[in-house]
Every structure is written in structure tokens, then in C-alpha cells.
Amino acid sequence: MFIVTNREVNEAKHDAAGAFGDKPMAGANSLRLAEASRKGKKWHIDILPDTLTPELASKVNLDAEQKHFASAYVARKLLSLCSGGGDASKGKNLLLYVHGFNNDMNDILERAEQLEKNYGVEVLCFSWPANGGGLQGVLSYKSDKRDALVSLGALDRVFEKMSDFLAEFNQQYVAELEAKAEAKFGGNSEAWDRYFAKEVNKKCPFTVNLMLHSMGNYLFKHLLGSSTYTANRLLFDNVVMVAADANNQGHAQWVDKIQFRNRLYITINENDMALRASRLKMGEQQHARLGHYLRRLDAQNAIYVDVTHMAHIGDSHAYFEGDALENAKVRTFFNKVLNGESGERTAKFDVARNVYRL
């Protein structure tokens, strides 16, 4: 599993608590990459060097005599994993996971591992300093909101790097494929298009999706409103906003800016205890949270999904894991949307509220 982070890192440490710090790195947009592997019940962390060693470069078929950055290593590893090493039947869809408030690295890795196991995806985790700065309660919540705002540029760079690598990967292959299509079907445009579409899918049979949980949505909201936001190219098949700890009021203004190929989902649990608590922590200036409020659901490009009264949901803030998965409809929904498919087809639509119920 790979992690991209703007946390301070310690390359000499290999445990999650030691390798990742609780504060942002110096330089607002700085990023580091790490590889995490399970060693029994614990996680082993390797912070990747900014510039690849010849050994790491050779592992992903890069010229060991040239200078390469860690991002090139991670991109090639992920592309190989997601494409099944050339065997599409063994491939996985890629999920960029942005976590929420008050998460330490062990919690984040455990959750990311469960996402991989439950939904068969390959997870790339963006981790920002969401540990509350060692504080508790209201102070911790306010500290994490400040760290989320500091992390905007870093998340923007993640989107931009992902987009650049996917474009580079596709550009080379598309040029080769166009030449083959022209040689085979130069005089038959219909056959040319059919051949091209079929062969492209063979080479890149996976989808790229984004899951934002809790305060990860607050970070995303402010990135979309930032004048420095540049990574606005079409990147994700599905964007899934789970238990969004952002204002319901006025959310359409930024949600309608989000680009995607297939669907944008916003899930809601009116009984979400964590979102109720987050509203109380900030007092009256904290408006109703998007992830637990069934009014003013007015974004034009969003599909709202209400899970409030479903079995095994209760007051859960993370109803994509744990007991909630005993509900087959919930498991099926998340399995589809986190893999780039449409998840609302069998749901009932409440026209008055503009929301689907599974």
C-alpha cells in the first residue's frame, strides 16, 4: 500500500507512529511518498527517497543511470497492480482515499487495508496531519481544521501528479494504437472506432476513483474554492463524499465545480453521531453538516444517498465498514461506487427530497 503525505516524516523509523509526524512539513505544498506493508499485526513503513536509488529504479524498469523521483516509482507500481501486470482479470480499480478528523497513521492504514479487502480496490492514501496536534475535544477539532486548510496545496499537487502520470501513460499507448488502427481500418471509420475502443480497454481496464471521508470533504471544499487550484482536469470516474463534515448551507456552489466521468455521490446519515458532535464543538457558527442533513440537497451534479434508517447503520460515521457491511445493500452500494460503477440503479428515489434510498 502506498501513502502520499504532507506530514513530517522520519526516514530512520519504520513504524507508523515514528515514521509519520503530527505536523505538516515545512513548505505548504511539500509531499513525501511511503510504502506500507503488513508485518504480522504491525505495519512496516518505508519512506521512499525523493530521488530513486538505482535499485528502486530498476525494480520498475526505469533507467538506473537517469534521475527519477519517487512519484515515478509509485506510479509504475500502481499501474502494474491495477492492470494486473498485463492480465486484466487480475487487475483492480484505483481508489484515492482522503481521511478525516483525528486520525493517526495506524488508524488510517487499518482503514485503508479494510477498504482493499472489502471492495477489491487498490488504495492510494493521501494523509494530512489530522491528529488534533495532541489536543482533545474542541481544541483538537479546531486544530485539525487549521491543518486541513494548510494541506490544500499538497492535495492539489496529488491530483496534478496523478493526472500527469495517467496522461503520460495514455499518450504513449494511444499514439501506438492509433497507428495500428489506421493500418488495419484506415478506410472504415466505424471499424476503426470499434477496434480502438476495444484495445484501449484492454490496456487500461481499471477506473480511478476518489473517496473523501468526514473532514476530508472540508479540505476538498476549500481546495475547490482556492485561487491556487489547478488540478481541475478530468481525473476520477466516481467521486464519493462519505459523511461530509462540511456545511450543507451553500454546498452546491462548490460541489457543482467537481469534475468526474461517471458519478458524484454524497452519502447522508441523519443519526451520524460524529457529525452531530462536530456541529456542537464549534457552536452556532457551525452550520448543519452536509453528511447528516436532508434539506437543501440542491447540487445539480450530485447524487444524494440516504442510509439513515437502514439496518446496521445506527449512528455510524463510517458506514462503509464494520457492522454496516452486514447490510447487503450497503455493501453492494459501496462496492459499486468505489469501483467506478453506478450504485443507485436499484435504489428508490424520493423526488421531494432529491435523495435516493437504497
Image (cartoon, rainbow, N blue to C red):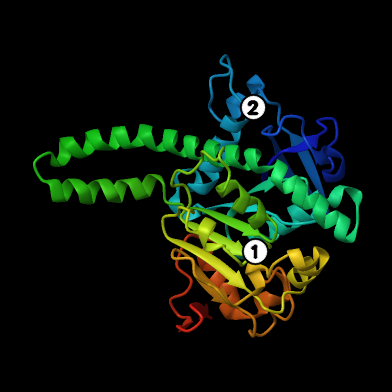
Q: Amino acid at mark 2?
A: Leu
Residue mark closest to the camera, 2 vs 1: 1
Numbered disc 1: secondary structure: loop
**Residue 40 seen anywhere in this rendered image of the structure:** no
Give the residue number, with chain letter if any, for mark 1: 247
Q: Nearer the viewer, residue 202 or 111?
A: 111
Q: Residue at x 45, y 80 (%)?
A: 346
Q: Residue furthest right?
A: 135
Badge 2: residue crowd in 10 Å (few <14, some 14–19, many ≥20): some
Q: Are marks 2 and 1 in contact (CB under 8 Å)?
A: no
Question: Image check: 290 left or right of 304?
Answer: right
Q: Amino acid at mark 1?
A: Asn
Q: Residue furthest front?
A: 285
- Who comes first in sequence, dot 2 or dot 1? 2
Q: Nearer the viewer, residue 330 or 227?
A: 227
State the mark number for residue 56.
2
Q: Residue at x 64, y 69 (%)?
A: 291
